[in-house]
Image (spheres, grey):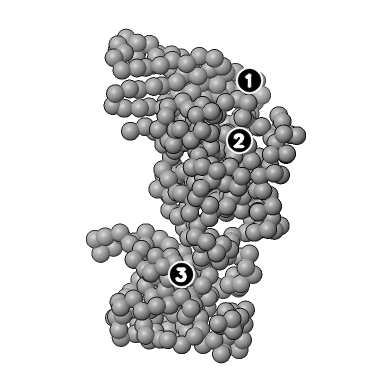
Amino acid sequence: MAYACRLRVAAGGARSYYLPWKDGMGEVVLRDVTISGPNRARVQVQTSEKCVRIEKGSSMKSIMLVAAALLLAVGFAVAALSANKSRSGEVTMEKKETALDQVVFAGGCFWCTESDFEKVDGVVEVVSGYTGGTRVDPTYEQVSAGQTGHVEAVQVTFDPARVSYKELLEYFWKHVDPTDGGGQFVDRGGQYRSAIFYRNEEQREVAEASKRELQQSGRFQKPVVTDILPLNVFYRAEDYHQDYYKKNPIRYNYYRFNSGRDQFLSKVWGKSMGQPTRSLHEESGRGSGPYAKPSDEEIRSRLTPLQYKVTQHEGTEPPFKNEYWDNKREGIYVDIVSGEPLFSSLDKYDSGTGWPSFTKPLEPGNIVEKQDRSLFTTRTEVRSKHGDSHLGHVFPDGPPPTGLRYCMNSASLRFIPAADLEKEGYGAYSELFRAK
């Protein structure tokens, strides 16, 4: 088992000290050190030029010496920070890095991916490197030859107060070809495939939902095949690869133009490739209207007791004895509370469960998925974004192309026939049924 856990403690203009734990003092920024077990442990204490190794069989005395060196490094860093604060009378801007977060993306050539993410407001640092494989301390020559299992990737450090992880994911999709599993653009081979590496379960869930949203948006005709994988160890690439686009602008621009990357992205995304501001579903111009949840008093007055119980108290209606389980008419289904569009008859199918089932939402942006641990199991609850209505659950046992089954309660939905879409204010969806 190996995992990344290097942390940097930096003080003003002093050296940077890398520690294998998070200390609450000073400036702490997540980095990557390798701890490999059970047969070997490798811990780096990196200043400008030093590296200390702890190998299998090292004496306790050696290990204690390294531990002492680590504590000494912390002491120097904290002292420098304290002096810095005393001189200036205020906390330096660098201390704000304690609130930073990180994500690792693979998008083909890391020169390009680094350049793209360094343009994002709220991104503090982008480092080119390698991850996903088995070789320790790989070189560029080894990775580019496809000998290591690693991919070229970038480690993005960002300020969540200025740009969210979800927004970075949406920006990532707009700078890769997520349907290409054999590489990216002119660079071919698994070492250039696209991937998202998550650091925790929360990042994994957000990444999976973002990938689903992209697939359901209809932006690409082919399946989205970008891997979503746990982050193991991220190895910083050689110095000459860092900020390559700045150091070698002529060669970089020549390579990038001839790779076909920008031509593809411009064709697919147009002008929306810039700063991550709007979600994918919003770019369609549909489904994001002025929907809101009414007061509880109004909801009670409008809904039947069953509808109120299902939408407001996570109830479940009986199978085969509900309004839409076998409805075969063309039209869309909206939230009975807020009216926001949710599903289409074009994606409805007979799941045999006795509840209306769909392979995907009509407007993924109007769907919120939450973990549900009731009934002694873990399921994924589906709610409406604006009305916050309980709709049902989604299961990974549906038919192609998504493999998903959105199992909904009829009591949470209102069906609008295709012929009435214009009259009901949903005319933008009429084209879906005229095209059939």
Measured Cα–Cα span from mark 1 to mark 3: 53 Å
Q: Nearer the viewer, mark 1 or mark 3?
A: 3
Q: Is residue 171 above or below residue 16?
A: below
Q: Is residue 366 above or below residue 198?
A: below
Q: Residue at x 53, y 37 (%)?
A: 152
* Lower sequence index among marks 2 and 3: 2
Q: Amino acid at mark 1?
A: Gly
Q: Nearer the viewer, residue 265 or 315?
A: 265
Measured Cα–Cα span from mark 2 to mark 1: 18 Å
Q: Is residue 226 above or below residue 242?
A: below
Residue placed under numbered mark 1 in the picture = 13
Residue placed under numbered mark 3 in the picture = 360
Q: Nearer the viewer, residue 165 or 135?
A: 135
Q: Is residue 297 above or below residue 54?
A: below
* Lower sequence index among marks 2 and 1: 1
Q: Which quadrant holds the C terminus?
A: bottom right
User: Mark 2 falls on what kind of element?
Assistant: strand
Q: Residue at x 37, y 72 (%)?
A: 407
Q: Residue 330: where, in percent of width, then height?
A: 49, 85
Q: Residue at x 58, y 33 (%)?
A: 127
Q: How many marks?
A: 3
CB atoms of marks 2 and 1 within 8 Å? no
Q: Amino acid at mark 3?
A: Lys
